[in-house]
Image (tube, grey):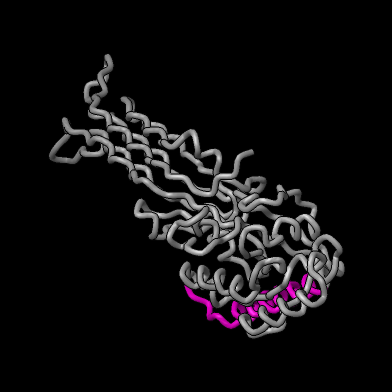
Amino acid sequence: MKFLDQAKIYVRAGDGGAGCLSFRREKFIEFGGPDGGDGGRGGDVWIECVDGLNTLIDYRFQQHFKAKKGGFGMGKNRAGAKGDDVVLKVPAGTEVLDEDGETVLADLTAVGQRVRFLKGGNGGFGNAHFQTSTNQAPRRANPGQEGEERWIWLRLKLIADAGLVGLPNAGKSTFLAATTAAKPKIADYPFTTLHPGLGVVRVDGREFVLADIPGLIEGAHEGVGIGDRFLGHIERCRVLLHLVDGTSEHAGKTYKIVRKELEAYGAGLEDKPEIVALSKADALDPDTLKEQVARLKRAAKRTPIVLSAQSGEGIQAVLRQLLAVIDEGRALEEVREVQEPWRP
């Protein structure tokens, strides 16, 4: 199944049905009077977060979604039927943006969330509605109101506890494959990963979700390489694992390139807790490894973890550090929820 994380679609709620202009005419009924029913209400547009989806591919080949119109009113005071609703099913982590692509209209982060996005038009009144003591035979009926319509963007941001960042070929996919059951594509050329991937990490009897995104290069915020559009998938992460390729020319400069792109992107990524690790340690001799660790320590202003996804060196240590930060973030969220005052 192809991964698609954003789509532009047109949605329209149903128009209300027209009211009916009718009079009761029956043999032996001297005073029939008006009996035109009201029109039915148009269908609504709902957006629902469901389980079992991890992509927006359903909106790749169909971009127009319209709810049904309300039924027309009929004689004998019969009201029109309500139009059928349209339900857009999206995966957890989907944002609904206005046509400008910036204004957030809804954010669905949990399975089961359901939002009525557009309201259907009201049905028109039939002539029976306008009968008064001074107007016994009204010849007036209202048309139904038009439903709401608009173009919107659906943008998926993966729900993960930790995210992997780094330059292409920094060993992110190898690390994901070594620590989870995910099977990402791994090769010895840049940009092997073209779409974000998820995996469930198990450590010390606990679990958390790890996200891998395509690598960043210098100028990614200006569209160089794949660009920085996939950084949105780690905006919701509690901690970032920054992998620096130990076989690169200068580990410190490599680290600063990625940090510069995170700061240029914004959205709070530069302020997220970060764990720095020097990867591919198995490919370095002791002297080179020591030199690269020193360079990375000066650039990151912290001691990096030395790891190798091939040999398993440092894997458990970095996973335990990630889990500790994730637990701390969850605890802070629980405290914040308790301290927030109730509002009607």
* Position of 295 relative to 224 (above/below): below
From the viewer's perspective, tell me whether residue 276 is left or right of residue 181.
left
Residue name at image x 72 percent, y 83 percent: 303
Magenta segment boundaries in residue numbering: 317-344
Q: Residue at x 70, y 60 (%)?
A: 172
Q: Which residue is rendered at x = 65% and y = 64% of the image?
A: 163
Residues 100 and 286: in front is: 286
Q: Is residue 82 visible?
A: no
The secondary structure making up most of the magenta span is helix
Q: Residue furthest top?
A: 27
Whether residue 336 appears in this view of the structure is yes
Image coords of residue 327 (percent x, y): 72, 75
The answer to which quarter of the image holds residue 326 is: bottom right
**Is residue 334 within the magenta segment?**
yes
Q: Which one is in front, 274 or 13?
A: 274
**Toward which corner of the image does residue 231 lie, by quadrant?**
bottom right
Q: Residue at x 67, y 84 (%)?
A: 302
Does 131 sit above or below residue 75? below
| Coordinates of residue 64 in the picture (x, y in percent) | 41, 36
Is residue 223 left or right of 318 when viewed as pictured? left
Q: Position of residue 143 (x, y in %)?
A: 24, 35
Q: How many marks?
A: 0
User: Position of 325 compared to 336: left or right?
Assistant: right
Q: Is residue 29 left or right of residue 305?
A: left
Residue 2 x, y percent position in the rendering:
60, 40
Q: Quadrant of the N terminus?
A: top right
Residue at the left extreme?
134
Magenta span has 336? yes
